[in-house]
Image (cartoon, rainbow, N blue to C red):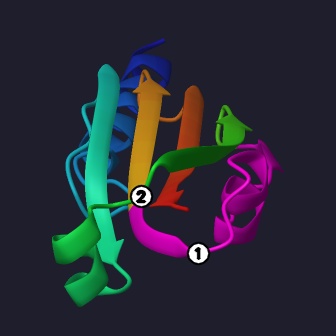
Amino acid sequence: MKKYLLWLSVVLATLFLSNCVSLLGGLQGSLYTDVVENATIINKDASEKEGLGTKTGEACATAYLGLVATGNAGIKAAAQKGNINNVRALDYKMNSILGSVLVTKCTIVHGD
C-alpha cells in the first residue's frame, strides 16, 4: 500500500509540475488555464495604419487526457472560418482543465 501511495504521489507531482509551462511558451496553470497570447503581426506597417482588420476567424484542436488529440488549429482553417483573405495578425488561445485532462488550443486570425 505504501508503494502504491508513493507511486501515486510521484505521478501526481510530475503531472502538476510538468504543466507549469504551456506549449505556447507562456503560462499554464496546473488546475485551470484560460490564456490568450499574441503571436505575431504579419504586416506591421499596414496594421498600424489600418488596424488588425474587420474580420476574425478561430480554429481549435482539443486533447483528452493527453492521449487523444483532434481538430485543426491551423492558420488556414481559422482564416477560412472567418472568411479572411488577407491575414494581418495571429493570436493563440489555450484552455486547460487539470493540466492535461482537457486541453483546447485555438489559433485566432485577424484580417480582411
61 left or right of 109 in image: right
Numbered badge on residue 86: 1
In the image, 10 versus 36, the foreground residue is 36
Q: Would you identify the image quadrant in which residue 96 lies?
A: top left
Residue 89 percent across, percent down from the top left: 39, 68
In the image, 39 versus 52, the foreground residue is 52
Q: Check if mark 2's residue and mark 1's residue have beta carbons within 8 Å.
A: yes
- Distance from disc 2 to disc 1, alpha carbons, whole Å, reads 9 Å
Residue under label 2: 53
26 left or right of 15 in image: left
Give the magenta-colored segment's residue range.
67-90
Residue at the top extreme, as displayed: 1
> How many neighbours does mark 1 have within 10 angstroms: few (below 14), some (14-19), or many (20 or more)?
some
Q: Residue type at mark 2?
A: Gly
In the image, 2 versus 23, the foreground residue is 23
Q: Is residue 87 magenta?
A: yes
Report helix, strand or loop for mark 1: loop
72 left or right of 88 in image: right
Q: Would you identify the image quadrant in which residue 105 lies?
A: top right
